[in-house]
């Protein structure tokens, strides 16, 4: 009986804590009282894309990579050539 009461009390405390935390964050967000973190201005130039390799790809680049990696793959099993267990 005491275990049930302790468990119910702990559940109640957790529920109240979650509700209180959610209420605090909702109120802070709606009034604008939440402090902004991070810089207010971007540190990089948004007009310049920093990864030039992005522009070197075309519509078939994925298939080119797929073909170039084919030599590293294991052979696919066939129903006509089943694997035989070695003794």
Image (cartoon, rainbow, N blue to C red):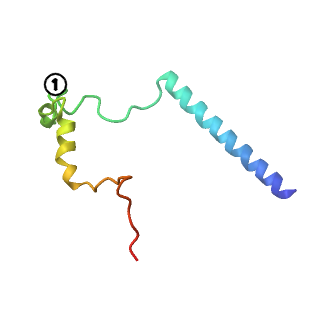
The C terminus: image quadrant: bottom left
Which residue is drawn at the image coordinates 77% and 52% (left, top)? Answer: 7
**Picture coordinates of residue 44, whole percent (x, y):** 19, 32
Horizontal arrangement in the rendering, residue 10 relative to residue 20 (left or right)? right
**Quadrant of the rendered image containing residue 74:** bottom left
Which residue is drawn at the image coordinates 16% and 34% (left, top)? Answer: 54
Kindly give the residue lying farthest to the bottom in the view shown.
87
Taking 62 as reference, is 76 above or below it?
A: below
Total tally of numbered discs in the picture: 1
**Picture coordinates of residue 58, whole percent (x, y):** 15, 30
**Picture coordinates of residue 27, whole percent (x, y):** 56, 26
Kindly give the residue lying farthest to the right in the view shown.
1
Q: Which residue is mark 1?
A: 47
Q: Secondary structure at mark 1?
A: loop
Kindly give the residue lying farthest to the top in the view shown.
31
**Quadrant of the rendered image containing residue 56:** top left
Which residue is drawn at the image coordinates 59% and 33% (left, top)? Answer: 22
């Amino acid at each position: 009986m005491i275990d049930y009461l302790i468990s119910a009390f702990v559940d109640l405390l957790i529920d109240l804590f979650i509700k209180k935390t959610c209420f605090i964050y909702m109120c802070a967000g709606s009034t604008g009282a939440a402090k902004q973190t991070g810089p207010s201005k971007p540190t990089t130039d948004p007009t310049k894309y920093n990864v030039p390799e992005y522009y070197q790809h075309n519509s078939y680049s994925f298939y080119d990579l797929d073909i170039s990696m084919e030599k590293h793959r294991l052979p696919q099993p066939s129903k006509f050539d089943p694997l035989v267990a070695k003794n």
